Amino acid sequence: MSEIDVFLPLREKMVREQILSRGIKNPQVIKALRKVPRHEFVALPFHKDAYADYPLPTAAGQTISQPYMVALMTELLEIYGDETVLEIGTGSGYQTAVLAEMVQTVYSVERIENLSLEADLTLLRLGYKNVKLHVGDGTLGWEEFAPYDRIIVTASAPNLPQPLVDQLKEGGKMVIPLGASLGQDLIVAEKHKGQIKLFDYGKCVFVPLVGEFGWPASTG
């Protein structure tokens, strides 16, 4: 069988059993999860597990999130299609690709250079042209292209990084795991009249967000 014959049924099964069955309803999120070839974002030995219901390891001790968590965080952003999104933590580039299927432009920051370079190569190979990547401290955001309609943070922070709050548009939303390193709450932060309101969507576990406004480097 060809590769597409092998992985398409696995992707459909992932969407049916892990995404739809858990209540994800946004049709654009579902469409993106059906389209993006998740196996392309993990090392060859993990291809057989690419559509399984758990995170997978990537380089430098990082992870590619569980498919459901990718879907949930994306749905919580409430994307309509014309937004600019800042992603903190490019990682493998999988979440970046899902966002790129749905929005005008994705700006993504990764502190680990080789991860960013590998993600860039994968995204280019798959034809994503509405993505801009940057290597740097994600807790500082990416001021050059601010403000952003939406911000998604794919690592856990002890508190909301102030630069990200400052770079979020009025009326914008940020999805971010907040809390201790061993377990966090998945938070949606909404900005109204310069003030931030927080909404808790349950427990989660992410790698630490390392940086000036996050955890010290020894944690990551």
Image (tube, rainbow, N blue to C red):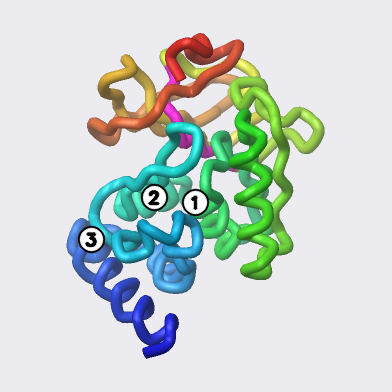
Check whether the beta carbons of the residues at disc 3 and disc 1 lie within 8 A of each other. Answer: no
Give the farthest residue toward the right. 144
Residue nearest the viewer, comparing 11 with 22: 11
Secondary element at image label 1: helix
Q: Tell me where residue 58 appears, x and y as whole percent.
A: 45, 43
Asked if residue 198 is among those painted magenta in the image, a careful observer would answer no
> Which comes sooner in the sequence, label 2 or label 1?
2
Is residue 172 visible to the viewer in this orientation of the structure? no
Q: Secondary structure at mark 2?
A: helix
Alpha carbon distance from label 3 to label 2:
11 Å
Q: State the residue at coordinates (55%, 55%).
A: 99
Q: What residue is shown with label 1?
A: 95
The magenta segment is: 150-157
Residue that appears at 44% across and 35% down: 62
Tell me which corner region of the image, top left, top right, bottom left or bottom right, holds residue 201: top left
Say which of 168 and 59 sits in front: 59
Sequence-wise, the earlier of marks 3 and 2 is 3
Pointers 2 and 1 in contact (C-beta within 8 Å): yes
The residue pinned by badge 3 equals 18
* Amino acid on which the number 1 mark rests in the picture: Gln
Closest to the observer, 155 or 30: 155
Q: Is residue 156 magenta?
A: yes
Dot label at residue 70: 2
SS of the residue under disc 3: helix
Give the vertical position of 171 relative to 16 (above or below): above
